[in-house]
Image (cartoon, rainbow, N blue to C red):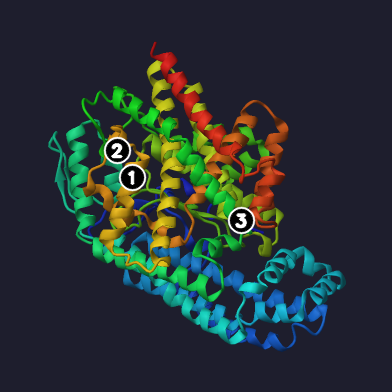
Amino acid sequence: MRRLAFCATLALSTALVPLRAAEPAVPAAYMWDLSDLYPSAAAWTAAQTKLKGDVAKLDRYKSTIGNSAGDMLAALKAISAVHKEIDRLSVYASLKGDEDVRVPENQARVQLAQALAAGFGEKTSWLTPTILAIGAEKVTAFQKQAPELSSRFGFFLDNVLRSGPHTLTPEAEAVMASASNVLAQPDTIYSQLSNGELPFPSVVLSDGTKIEHLDQAQYSKYRQSANRDDRKKVFDTFWGSWKQYEGTFGATLNTQVLAEEFDAKVRKFPNALSDALFNDAMPEAVYRQLVAQANAGLPTFHRYLKLRQKLLGIKGELGYQDMYPSMFHLATPPKFTVEDSERIGLEVTAAYGPEYTTLLKKGFDARWMDVLPRKGKASGAYMNGSAYDVHPYLHLNHNDDYQSLSTLVHEWGHAVHTLLTTANQPYEKSNYSTFTAETASIGNEMLLNDYMVAHAKTKEEKLYYLGEGLELIRTTFFRQTMFGEFQLAIHEEVEQGKALTGARLSEIYCGLLKHYYGDDKGVTKIDPAYCVEWAFIPHFYYGFYVYQYATSMAGAAALSKDMETGDSKARERFINLLKAGGSDYPYALYKKAGLDMATPAPYQALIARMNHLMDQIDALQK
């Protein structure tokens, strides 16, 4: 059974959580309560010590796992139990580390969790080779003799058996497991530098506002300024800081790429993309189709950019610094407190039915979020649902604007997905793919946008939200696909034996920026000073990851459209997709939901949605 962090009345208390000296306290209601994971840091340490002992014993099952169905079940259950507790341990370390990246003790805890996970990998590195040696015929017979092998571990066993061509000897697997902690360090170094040690300058805006610390959160806020000179000043200042560390960020990202190429080479994959897609059994055609369809849709994207230029009243060329302010000016920009965002989130997702609403309200009533930005806190937003026996946690940096509302709704899409999965799948089948995860969250954002358009009180508000709907497609479909194409390009550089310096990364990124934003067509002028933006993107340290945002948006567009038209079967297909968790491969789960993501149709439907939003704008402005 899962435990709530706090009941509703306690979650709304006015208790304060102290931070570092000389910094203002944050109301407890706006911070997560990690005691659901461990009651104290000392309890975490005790659990880590115990787990080290448990991990050390796991290789004893190597000699017995093939003896009988019962022995195989016992071995897999023991390994799974330790893995589940390592997940819980890692969640606490990660969340605590992101509360304030300047606290050395927290970062040390992250490293200890990584080391324990690496040790687990070493002590279980024999598992896949041993199961392969047992053979598919015997494994299948064992599953018939012990049904729990199928109900809990069937998907895992299928994945193992198909991985035969890419599995090494037990000794080589042990070496790869030993290296995993080292290969994870580029992300750690990037996070420490970008969130904790990168010196961010101050900047004074045209109205006299002085931004003392133009970090990621402040950049995200002030790049939306209605004053074009201020936007350029913010861009010039912010990216000037990153440019100074272009070489360092280039070294970390190059190391990440080399690590991925190393794994692909050792495991006999044709390339790193094939390696990255293997675990999900994802056809490479899906990735290639996405890139092809995004490029085919660039005329629609350029239509949007020209509309943005016109509506912002920009004389001359549109600039990259002009991407973030709303295209429609409102005398009073909409503001949404955390409480407003939660209320709207409940109304928007009512389209999914009462089961979904109950779970969402349960989460809102508890302290599962760290909501507000502050100095030292990690930037960005995410949901961490890896603590199977507890509940999801959400990391946000809420600025009370529409983007913050949309982000909150997005991340709670992930959280409810996790709750639905854990309620319907065992731990061993709960690790769903990002490919399906983003449909759960981006679908929420699209429903939110349609809701805001429908509930707008004036034509001006309606236009504002239509503009935000277009921006969602720009950032989630075209921008993320551009990121995916960038990852393909930089891997091809390494595969061709070329050097991948920070300067070269900026050059490659600049070429894609100019292509997507129509620099050669006079649509947008890209300032090369902003081409260091690649160094700002943490997702490049997660492997071939970002493409899934764009594919999921195409899938979400189709499902959301059907649900909004009252198709109850579409809602059922969507909820079943979430409940399925990691019980099947994501491409297959999508097909069960009625979508083939290797075909042009879902992407073309999303492009059609973008054109429809612009058609509505044109009609309202006549």
Residue at (52, 84) in percent of width and height: 175
Q: Nearer the viewer, residue 4 or 537?
A: 537
* Of marks 2 and 3, the one in the foreground: 2
The answer, for residue 604, to whether it is visible in the render is yes
Left or right: 167 in relation to 542? right
Residue 554: image location, x then y, percent? 55, 39
Residue at (64, 53) in percent of width and height: 586
Q: Residue furthest top?
A: 622
Q: Is residue 276 above or below residue 548?
A: below
Residue 507: image location, x then y, percent? 28, 54
Q: How many labels sit on residues?
A: 3
Q: Whole-Å distance between the Cαs marked 2 and 3?
A: 33 Å
Left or right: 48 in relation to 303? right
Contact (CB < 8 A) between labels 2 and 3? no
- Identify which amino acid the numbered label 1 is placed on: Leu
Closer to the chain start, of discs 1 and 2, is: 1
Q: Quadrant of residue 242?
A: bottom left
Residue identifier under label 2: 519
Residue identifier under label 1: 513
Characterize the local packing of mark 2: few (<14), some (14-19) or many (20 or more) Cα atoms within 10 angstroms: some
Residue 118, disc: none
Numbered disc 3: secondary structure: loop
Q: Nearer the viewer, residue 288 or 382?
A: 288
Q: Whole-Å distance between the Cαs marked 1 and 3?
A: 27 Å
Left or right: 615 in relation to 588? left
Residue identifier under label 3: 282
Closer to the chain start, of discs 2 and 3, is: 3
- Identify which amino acid the numbered label 2 is placed on: Asp
Closer to the chain start, of discs 1 and 3, is: 3
Q: Residue furthest front?
A: 496
* Of marks 1 and 2, the one in the foreground: 2
Q: Nearer the viewer, residue 464 or 135?
A: 135
